[in-house]
Image (cartoon, rainbow, N blue to C red):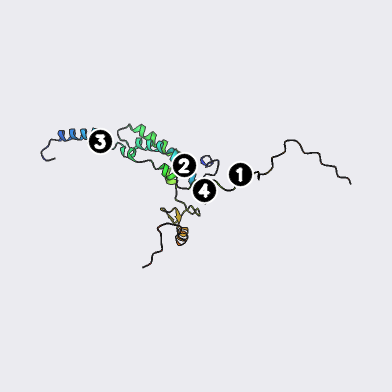
Amino acid sequence: MSGVPRARMLDLMKVQCQIFATTYNPDGIRMGNKVLRQRLRGPTLAKYYPPRGPSVNDLQRVRSRGKGAPKKKRTAPAAPEKKSK
Amino acid sequence: MSMFRAKKLDIGCFVNIKTIRDHSKRKAFAAAEPERQALRYIIRNTTLPARTRAEAQLQLTQMHCYTRPTQIRGRCILGGKGRGILRDFKLSRYNFRMQALAGNIPGVRKASW
């Protein structure tokens, strides 16, 4: 600090912090700000596995082409004939 | 844990329980990350009262283990393997070799000199 008084340097630091929107912390106290500065890495980590695309055998597509399984009958089926001995 | 698992399968690579589990962990971590970072900030801030910081420590340790980033592991997207993964390609070393020799990975060729 070649001849410049400390108070003046601190003032300079304060103004610097105001301009660049950083925390004024001349004593170097641990305030945990480095945690706030870190970027969130959740979104990139969550994108690791490729998403599931539409598949050829999608049930909707099969149904739309009329190839799906028939609908379950609502009414009870006709009573089966009794077997004669 | 099943409460973190998607109700419908939502990954389109090799699927086994390990990849599904890892995917659930990734999503759980992504959802809980802001909360974790807030707690971490409180813990590391020495200007806050000691009691607050201790409470934050407790809260952070009591969060579900699926929300922890260390639970996440790189897995092969072709075989689900958990070891020997080349992170840049998300492939295990054997699958990477097979894909590279088949020319499926752009810019990768077998070294020869």
* Residue A1 in the figure: left or right of residue A46: left
Tag 3: amino acid: Phe
Q: Which chain carries label 2?
A: B
SS label for mark 2: helix
Residue at which label 1 appears: A59
* Residue A44 in the figure: left or right of residue A67: left
Q: Which chain carries label 4?
A: B
Give the mark nearer the N terminus: 2 vs 4: 4
SS label for mark 3: helix
Residue at which label 4 appears: B12
Judging depth in this view, the residue of A62 and B73 nearest the camera is A62
Across the whole image, how many numbered discs are drawn on residues?
A: 4
- Residue B62, horizontal then vertical, whole percent: 44, 38
Tag 4: amino acid: Gly
- Residue A39, horizontal then vertical, whole percent: 36, 41
Residues beneath discs 2 and 4 located on the same chain: yes
Q: Is residue A70 above or below residue B89?
A: above
Give the CA distance from mark 2 to mark 1. 27 Å
Residue at which label 2 appears: B27
* Residue B58 in the figure: left or right of residue B1: left
Give the CA distance from mark 3 to mark 1. 57 Å
> Contact, CB < 8 Å: mark 3 with mark 2?
no
